[in-house]
Image (tube, coloured by chain):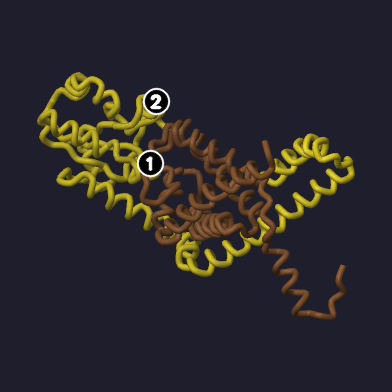
Chain colours: A yellow, B brown
Amino acid sequence: MILSGAYEISRNLQPVASAFRGLHVEDTRMLQRTLVSTLVKESLVILLAGTVLGGFLNQGLIRASMNGELLTRIGQRQMADLKEKAAHIPFVELKEARRLFNERTAIFVDARSSADYRESHIQGARGLPLVSLIQNRRLAEAIIPDKSARYIVYCSGEGCDLSVELAKELLSLGYSNVEVLGEGYPAWLAAGYPVEPSR
Amino acid sequence: MEDSSKQYICLAFRLLIGGMFLWAGAEKILKPFEFSVAIYNYRLFPGPVIGLAAAILPWVEAIAGLCLLVGFNTKGAAAITSLLLLVFTGLIIISAVRGLDIDCGCFGGVERTVGLQAILEDVLLLIVSVAVVAFEKTPLKAHVLFRNLFRKMIPGRIER
């Protein structure tokens, strides 16, 4: 794409340049061909060198990505980072969250944007976007008035820290029993657990 | 503008892009797994693509950056940096539109969130990089050296 783009640039620039230099159209065409040929050859040398070196020195990474292990390791790393960020806030496992959902002993709180919440959320979850709460801290009491209830906060998975940040906000507002579902909404959905609007 | 002034400006552009790509590539070469996490965060690519990109892309970046710095294969290197900047800008725009609040993973150790500022910076770098493709005139080229070396190794080869 860039080669054809560069070719176009050179084609547009050459007539102007040749007018100054007194070159004929045939000369400019030859220059264009030389430029494209140079670009292709030089780019290929670099791409080949990068592919050989990178492929040879990162065989483990490539193998892990082919057998799916890389995604598992990325998930684990992100969960570890999230827990480190959460400090003292407890996390709840997906299956445990499902058990609490069935027993109706916990209230789920969606920390994602209003648009994401409207699109789909855990069945019965309350939508409390972190951004909205920061703008209006009274919003929490309007949406989840009982400060002693058990709350499970979630967002878009291990790579998302909205749930942890919302949990911190809720704790600072006096909510005493707040946990984070680290795997978030994608894992809940992938497990086939109830969502609404139902899918 | 005089040809010599244009070449000085081009040299400055070349060194800027070369330095940035060498730095960015070297940081990622040292931490390939961290780079794979950054690619994963875009939530656009399957696992095998993430692994291959994390393994190869940093080396391509670093080699292209080094070539630009030392004046070796400069047009090809600038073409590659332009292509990469085009892809990065596209990815950042897509992620910004999707509302992702993630680090772009452009430079290791520097937090650069996906957004308007990152898009404008990348577009500016893309213009600089394309200018190097269009106007750079460094005579030292790898494929010419390889060709001459090849001719020396096989003396009987007919010169064209």
In space, the residues marked 2 and 1 are separated at their CA atoms by 16 Å
Between B123 and A90, the residue placed more toward the observer is: B123
At a point 68% along the width and 39% down the height, the residue shown is B2
Residue at the disc numbered 2: A115
Q: Amino acid at mark 2?
A: Ala
Q: Position of residue A14 (x, y in %)?
A: 78, 39
Between A55 and A177, the residue placed more toward the observer is: A55
Relative horizontal placement of residue A54, taking residue B27 as reference (left or right): right
For marks 2 and 1 on the same chain, the one whose residue lies earlier in the sequence: 2
At a point 19% along the width and 32% down the height, the residue shown is A169
In this rendering, does residue B48 appear at all? no
Relative horizontal placement of residue B77, taking residue A139 as reference (left or right): right
Q: In the figure, residue A49 lies in which quadrant?
A: bottom right
Above or below A40: residue A134: above
Above or below A161: residue B116: above
Q: Position of residue B79 (x, y in %)?
A: 64, 49
At a point 46% along the width and 33% down the height, the residue shown is B96
Residue at the disc numbered 1: A186
Q: Amino acid at mark 1?
A: Pro
Q: Position of residue B89 (x, y in %)?
A: 53, 39
